[in-house]
Image (cartoon, rainbow, N blue to C red):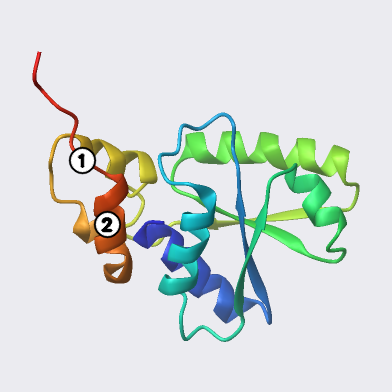
Amino acid sequence: MTLGHLDLIRRAASIFDDVTVAVMVNRAKTGCIPYEERAEMIVSACRGMENVHVDMWQGLLADYMRMHPGSVVLRGIRSASDYEYEAGSAAVNRRLCPGLETVFLPASDGLDCVSSSVVREIAAFGGEYGAFVPACNRKKLKKWLKPFSQDK
C-alpha cells in the first residue's frame, strides 16, 4: 500500500457512505507481499476511518461485485496509460457483471508518480522509500522489501 492508495481511500471515504477495500490476487502482477499481510497493512493504515472496511477475495472482481449489488468500483488514475488499462478492465467487468459501474478518480497532486512498482524498485536498490508509504507500515515493509544482492 502506498500513499497514493491511502489518499484514494481517504477521498473515497469522504464521497461514499461505505467504502470496502477489496484486497485481491492479480496473477498478472508479481507482488512480493502475501495478500493476507497486505490486508493487515491496509487495516492499519485506515485506522480511524470508520466507514472504511477491508475484505479479501481470490476470484474475479466481477464475481465479487455480483455478491455486492449496487456497489461501484473506484479506481485511481495516475496517467493516460492507467486510464486506458482501467477503461478496458471496466468494460470487461461490465460484460461479466451487467450494470456494474466503475468510477475513476485522478491521483492527487504529487502522488501521480507513486506506485507499488516504484516502491519495490527503490527498495531493491537499497533506497529510502518511506516517503511513499504510510508510516504505520514502514517497519512491516522492511520484512518484504529487501535490496537484492549484488554479489556475483
Q: How many marks?
A: 2
Q: Residue furthest top?
A: 152
Q: Looking at the image, which residue is at 75% across and 42% down?
A: 60
Residue 124 visible in this rendered orientation of the protein: yes
| Residue 48 % position (x, y) | 47, 86
Q: CA distance from mark 1 to mark 2?
A: 10 Å
| Mark 2: amino acid | Phe
Residue 122 is tagged as 1
Q: Quadrant of the C terminus?
A: top left
Badge 2 element: helix
Badge 1 element: helix
Q: Residue furthest right?
A: 98
Q: Quadrant of the N terminus?
A: bottom left
Residue 132 is tagged as 2
| Mark 1: amino acid | Ile
Q: Looking at the image, which residue is at 21% across and 42% down?
A: 123
Q: Nearer the viewer, residue 127 or 97?
A: 127
Q: Looking at the image, which residue is at 36% across and 51% down?
A: 112
Residue 106 visible in this rendered orientation of the protein: no
Q: Nearer the viewer, residue 101 or 27?
A: 27
Q: Are marks 1 and 2 in contact (CB under 8 Å)?
A: yes
